[in-house]
Amino acid sequence: MLYYVLVTLVIVFVRPAVAGDSSFESRKARARELLEQRDYEGALAVARSIHREWMDDVVTYQLMAEARLGLGDYAAAESDIQWMLDLREGKADARGWWLVAQFREVTGDLEGAIEAIATAVSRLPSRKEPDALKVFSYAGHLYAAQGRREQAISILTELAKTSDDPRQLYLLAGVTGDYRAFEASARARSGESRNANRELVLYLAGPGKKPAEALEIAQREATRRHDIGTLGALAAALAANGKPADALVTIQKALATGTRDPEILALATRLGAKHE
């Protein structure tokens, strides 16, 4: 009798995950798509719905962590990352270590972030892996942040040969000072769901010297997105348009999350916002 009860329990609890595998995969693909569009709230909602049905799935923890990092919910992101590491017994894949690197940077540990991204690179089977672009571009970003300019240029220039993604081009332009390729690509894709409008705002509010256009784009983006990066871009645009009080209020919303993102902190310093 006990045997049949155990068999019944196994069937009841295992069948949904097996039968729903294709559904889970399509939903995870949808969460990834939303993350690429920087719709962090939407991505988190999808990932959490999967998590409620499949609580020990490593990829779902990665999806939730990435969304929460974008939204500035660092405590929850740290918990998701720790679960990811525990479930993989500390042997996270390249995407996992990429997330660890991001978490470490935005919480003020640049050296730890560089160590994590180096581990991510070592976990890539080849440069043709789907996550390779993310990993190498982030490595270039971290090298630039550390002042290792030549290494950053080398990595980002190589990536630009294989990708015209404006987000990657923006990273390269930030190091070289040549924004022409970035601006052309960003403007061409400004109406697409996966765009670089946030970077375009920062460029127009700064070296592009078109503050009015920057603010127009930033305000439009802010009505659709509520992540830290968008808040930072909006604050920069407000400041460039002679609205320091509004810019200060906006950047303080980003700081309230506890972020140690170097770009956010640098902007906060310029605006006179108090932060540790």
Image (cartoon, rainbow, N blue to C red):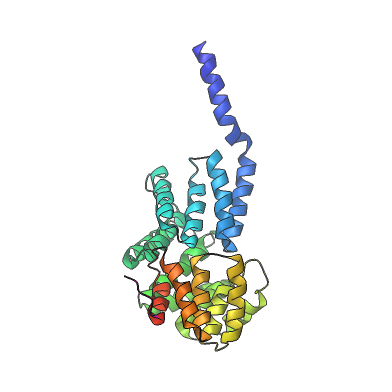
Q: Residue placed farthest to the bottom in the image?
A: 209
**Residue found 62% across the figure and 53% down from its top:** 30
Is 258 within the magenta?
no
Q: Position of residue 225 (x, y in %)?
A: 57, 65
Nearer to us in this view, 89 or 8: 8
**Residue 232 sits above or below residue 177 on the image:** above
**Residue 202 sits above or below residue 36 on the image:** below
Q: Residue placed farthest to the front in the image?
A: 245
**Residue 2 sits above or below residue 81 on the image:** above
**Figure quadrant of residue 41:** bottom right
Q: Which residues are magenta?
A: 272-276
- Which secondary structure is most common in the magenta stretch? loop
**Figure quadrant of residue 100:** bottom left
Q: Count how many numbered circles sit on residues in the image.
A: 0
**Residue found 54% across the figure and 20% down from its top:** 7
Q: Is residue 210 visible?
A: yes
Q: Is residue 151 visible?
A: no
Is 275 within the magenta?
yes
Q: Position of residue 34 (x, y in %)?
A: 60, 58
Nearer to us in this view, 75 or 127: 75
Q: Residue placed farthest to the top in the image?
A: 1
User: Going by the image, does 265 lie left or right of 30?
Assistant: left
User: Going by the image, does 215 lie left or right of 101?
Assistant: right
**Residue found 41% across the figure and 65% down from its top:** 256
The C terminus lies in quadrant: bottom left
Q: Position of residue 237 (x, y in %)?
A: 53, 80
**Figure quadrant of residue 21:** top right
Q: Position of residue 143 (x, y in %)?
A: 39, 73
**Residue found 43% across the figure and 48% down from its top:** 84
